[in-house]
């Protein structure tokens, strides 16, 4: 009986979270509050003066992520849309080790004129789109039922593969990214002719590094599938479809400097973000 009791105590001790695990959990919760607050500060506008249209911010994050292979880093992904269709996506994250900073990483998902502002300050005004849509080759007609279309979209995205040329410890390593099986976001936009659409993510651990958008688009004559690809990392990225390269982005040497690029980074001071506005939204 004594031996059994001792075994139970040892197992119970193993189940207790370590101090480091508790600290990491606290950092994740802290980042969750920070990211939501920062996203609310950013206003995304489409079109030109005098009547630009304000895009809608999705209140809940598309994805909550961490990447222990890179360090102690946590982030969340937020989406802006117009008429229910994605126009910009941002990953807002905070480093705790080996770096100490907070970052907003953003890419445009539209060919419309777009701008991001924070109060009266213009943050970002890309001069080109971060995505180009192409017809999906050898794709079946979109199914009539929504559930069947989801299965089709998952099957279509599995035809892609992605590789990131990541430089760590002074050495560049090519990393094959993992495709999340489920979309991070699904939508329809009748006004823009989108019967069904979904965003999928290529990730390292759970950190999004590239996006695939798949849409069933309607015309007067038919409904077909198309896809668009967008980067979510400043390192060199390559995406293949059925083994053939369909997108290739070179490394951005200083992504935080070009405010007219379709993809950019912003460092920000987390102490200047009003966290009290998002406490109730924290998990």
Image (tube, rainbow, N blue to C red):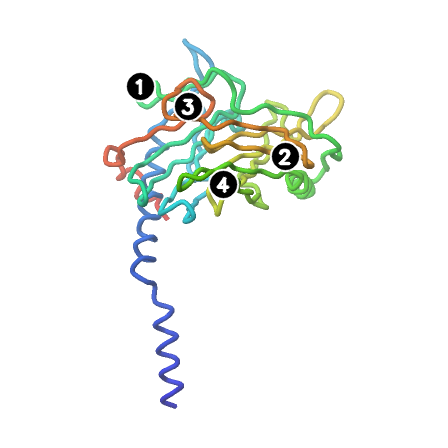
Q: Residue at x 67, y 43 (%)?
A: 151
* Quadrant in the picture for residue 5: bottom left
Front disc: 4 or 1: 4
The residue tagged 4 is 173
Whichever of callouts 4 and 1 sits on the residue coming sooner in the sequence is: 1
**Which of the two labelled residues, at mark 3 and mark 1, occupies the earlier sequence position?**
3
Give yes or no for contact between labels 3 and 1 (Cβ–Cβ under 8 Å).
no
Mark 4 or mark 2, earlier in chain: 4
The mark that comes first in sequence, 1 or 2, is 1
Camera-nearest label, 3 or 1? 1
Q: Is residue 106 above or below residue 161?
A: above
Secondary structure under badge 3? strand
Q: Depth-wise, is mark 4 or mark 2 nearer the camera?
A: 4
Pointer 2 or 3: first along the chain? 3
Which of labels 1 and 2 is toward the front? 2
User: Where is residue 31 shown, x and y percent of the image?
Assistant: 33, 43
User: What residue is disc 1 on?
Assistant: 121
The residue that disc 3 covers is 44
What is the spatial separation of the Cα atoms under label 3 and label 1, in whole angstroms? 12 Å
């Amino acid at each position: 009986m004594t031996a059994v009791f001792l075994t139970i105590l040892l197992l119970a001790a193993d189940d207790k979270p370590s101090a480091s695990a508790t600290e990491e959990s606290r950092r994740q919760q802290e980042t969750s509050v920070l990211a939501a607050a920062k996203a609310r500060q950013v206003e995304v506008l489409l079109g030109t003066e005098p009547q630009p249209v304000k895009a809608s911010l999705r209140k809940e994050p598309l994805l909550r992520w961490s990447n222990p292979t890179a360090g102690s880093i946590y982030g969340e992904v937020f989406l802006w849309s117009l008429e229910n269709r994605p126009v910009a996506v941002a990953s807002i994250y905070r480093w705790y080790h080996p770096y100490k900073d907070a970052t907003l990483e953003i890419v445009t998902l539209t060919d419309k004129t777009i701008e991001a502002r924070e109060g009266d300050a213009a943050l970002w005004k890309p001069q080109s789109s971060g995505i180009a849509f192409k017809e999906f080759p050898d794709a079946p007609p979109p199914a009539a039922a929504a559930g069947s279309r989801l299965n089709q979209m998952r099957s279509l995205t599995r035809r892609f593969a992605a590789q990131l040329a990541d430089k760590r410890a002074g050495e560049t390593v090519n990393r094959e990214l993992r495709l999340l099986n489920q979309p991070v976001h699904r939508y329809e936009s009748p006004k823009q002719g989108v019967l069904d659409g979904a965003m999928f993510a290529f990730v390292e651990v759970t950190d999004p590094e590239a996006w695939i958008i798949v849409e069933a688009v309607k015309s007067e004559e038919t409904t077909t599938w198309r896809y668009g690809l967008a980067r979510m990392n400043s390192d060199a990225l390559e995406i293949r479809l059925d083994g053939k390269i369909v997108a290739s982005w070179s490394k951005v040497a200083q992504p935080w400097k070009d405010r007219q690029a379709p993809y950019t980074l912003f460092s920000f001071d987390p102490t200047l973000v009003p966290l009290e506005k998002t406490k109730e939204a924290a998990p």
